[in-house]
């Protein structure tokens, strides 16, 4: 496990060239981390594999194909998101009606 980082100073003083006054910029304290802890402060230190050299224009074509595939997948996810939002709206309407009936019975 990683050791917790030292707390950051509550504010930094910055002198902006040409400004008449000093600016205080607040910083987020490390104690304000959510339940995920330091997960976003760690990083993989293993070196990345070297990229293969592009030969005779293959790289731009590959990137275009990859971009097309990502756009297609994004469109699918947007459709699924819209469908799930409609489902959620129906569920919330049903729950609202159920609660209204429940409170009316009392």
Image: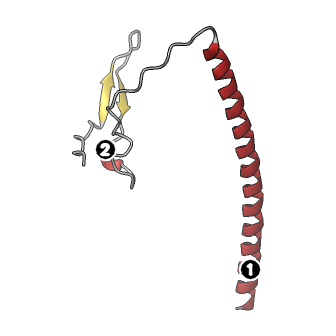
Q: Is residue 26 left or right of residue 6?
A: right
Q: Quadrant of residue 72?
A: top right
| Number of marks drawn | 2
Figure check: 32 above or below 57:
below
Residue marked by disc 1: 98
Q: How is the image coloured?
A: secondary structure
Residue marked by disc 2: 30
Q: Secondary structure at mark 1?
A: helix
Q: Quadrant of residue 28?
A: top left
> In the orientation shown, which residue stands out farthest toward the bottom?
106
Task: Residue 106: give x, y in percent of width and height.
Answer: 70, 91
**Residue located 22% across and 40% down the image:** 6
CA gap, disc 2 to disc 1?
Answer: 43 Å
**Residue located 42% across and 20% down the image:** 50
Q: Nearer the viewer, residue 10 or 30?
A: 30
Task: Residue 104: give x, y in percent of width and height.
Answer: 75, 86
Q: Earlier in the sequence, mark 2 or mark 1?
A: 2
Task: Residue 1: give x, y in percent of width and height.
Answer: 24, 49
Q: Secondary structure at mark 2?
A: helix
**Residue located 74% across and 91% down the image:** 105
Task: Residue 14: give x, y in percent of width and height.
Answer: 33, 21
**Residue located 72% across and 68% down the image:** 92
How many neighbours does mark 1 have within 10 angstroms: few (below 14), some (14-19), or many (20 or more)? few
Q: Is residue 4 left or right of residue 32?
A: left
């Amino acid at each position: 496990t990683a050791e917790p980082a030292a707390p950051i100073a509550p504010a930094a003083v910055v002198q902006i060239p040409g400004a008449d006054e000093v600016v205080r910029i607040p910083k987020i304290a490390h104690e304000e981390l959510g339940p995920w802890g330091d997960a976003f402060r760690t990083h993989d230190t293993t070196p990345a594999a070297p990229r293969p050299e592009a030969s005779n224009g293959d790289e731009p074509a590959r990137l275009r194909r990859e971009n097309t595939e990502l756009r297609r997948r994004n469109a699918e996810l947007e459709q699924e998101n819209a469908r799930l939002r409609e489902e959620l709206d129906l569920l919330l309407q049903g729950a609202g009606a159920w609660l209204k009936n429940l409170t009316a019975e009392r």
